[in-house]
Every structure is written in C-alpha cells, then in structure tokens.
Image (cartoon, rainbow, N blue to C red):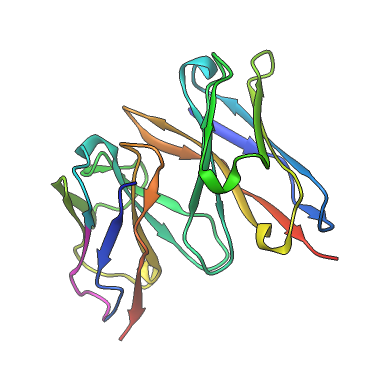
Amino acid sequence: DIQMTQSPVSLSASIGDRVTITCRASQTVVSYYLSWYQQKPGKAPKLLIYSATRLRGGIPSRFSGSGSGPEFTLTISSLQSEDFATYFCHQTFIYPWTFGPGTKVEIK
Amino acid sequence: QVQLVQSGPELKRPGASVKVSCKTSGFNFTSYDINWLRQASGQGPEWMGWMSPKTGYEQKAQKFQGRVTMTSDTSTRTAYMEVHKLTSDDTAVYYCAIDDFFSGPAWGQGTLVSVSS
C-alpha cells in the first residue's frame, strides 16, 4: 500500500497568511492521481485540487497545488476565515486508495 | 455533470446488515470502477473496495473480505454496497466514488450508518 504522510499535522495562521501543506507518498504517485480535499466538522470532504495542480470548478483561485511524485504541495495564498478546516491529500494511482492523515488549519 | 446520489441514513442493530445505494448520472456507468469508502467520526477516510459494473469483478480491502458485498444494476445505473454482521465499529459515513481521469474524483454525498443496540 502507498502510505501518505503530511506536514505539518496542524498549524495556526492568521487571516491573509500564506499557508503551505506538504504531502509525501511512500512510493511514486503519478500526478494525475493526486488530489486535495478540505473537510469541516460534520461535513463531507470537498475536492479542491485534482491531478495535483488542477483547480476544481468553483474553488477560489487562492488555492493551488504543485509537485510531482512523491512530494506534493497545497498552497493557500491568502488565508480567509472560511478556510479554517482540515486538509488531506489522496492518491488514486494504485489500489488501495489511500489518504494523508490530514492537516488542521486553525486560527492564530 | 457527474453525480452520485446515495440513499438515506440508516440505524441498525449489531449483527444486522445494511445496504447502501449509489445512483449515478453524467458518465458512462460501465466504464468506471465504483469505489466505496467510509469515514468514522474524527477519523480520516478509509477505502473499502471497488467493483466494476461492466464485469461484476470486485476487490476489497482485506478487513472487509467476507463481510462486504458490492453489486450494481446497469439498467438503473445504481451501485450497491452491503455490509453484514454490523458492529458499533461500523458506525460511519459511507461514500461511493469514481475517479475520472479528466475531472478527478467524484464522491456521493455520503450515507450515515449508525449501529447501536
């Protein structure tokens, strides 16, 4: 199985800050099969980025993704109040699909 | 537009079975594997397995083998996932999902399955 790790596990940031979250796979993941999700308590995960760099329709442009296997990055260019949530990466390159453990973004 | 619409919440007793449905539209149903995932409260998502509506072939994570059945009905474009011998550890939100090469993963809205005596 491909193990996904994320750093940091959590972070505190202020409105307007630039935030970067890193996801590392235990083996190569082809970029087309790496996505990023946002999740708020009690809600379903929300797809933000797919194919490592592609912004899903309707997602604000302050979100961006970069990288290639095995290391990927999610960046929020200017943190907004609605962005405080947990973010996790997800690989669909090889079964079983696996997920990063999540990064909780909290208000400073 | 790809859509996966799941059945409503379920409350079950320990030892019972539950069957969750996933009605799809907006894509060629027999061209995509249907995946099932679940997420317990406070935990990350967990992949359960996948099945091919075209062939009926299914592959499941080892912990679900022998207890989970995945089926589909191509005439209604609906996938089903049944979990048998439920315990409280099966309390979770269950999701169906596909992965489209061009538009990325698409998930259903989730079905809450609660197991309690």
Return the x and y of residue B30 as percentages of the image width and height: 52, 15
For the point 23% across and 44% down, the residue is A52
For the point 47% across and 54% down, the residue is A45
Q: In this view, does B79 lie above or below B11?
A: above
Residue A17 belongs to magenta span: yes
Return the x and y of residue A56 as percentages of the image width and height: 33, 42
Residue A104 belongs to magenta span: no
Return the x and y of residue B68 as percentages of the image width and height: 66, 40
For the point 48% across and 65% down, the residue is A40
Task: Evaluate whether residue B79 shows in this view.
Answer: no
Q: In this view, does B12 lie above or below A91?
A: below
In-front residue for pair B88/A81: B88
For the point 21% across and 52% down, the residue is A64
Q: Is residue A9 above or below residue B90?
A: below
In-front residue for pair A66/A2: A2
Please identify the residue farthest to the bottom as the structure is shown: A108
Return the x and y of residue A35 as percentages of the image width and height: 31, 46
In-front residue for pair A53/B20: B20
**Circle count:** 0
In the image, taking residue A58 as reference, residue A30 lies left or right, namely: left
Range of the magenta residues?
A13-23
Query: Residue A18's quadrant in the figure?
Result: bottom left
In the image, taking residue B51 as reference, residue B13 lies left or right, namely: right
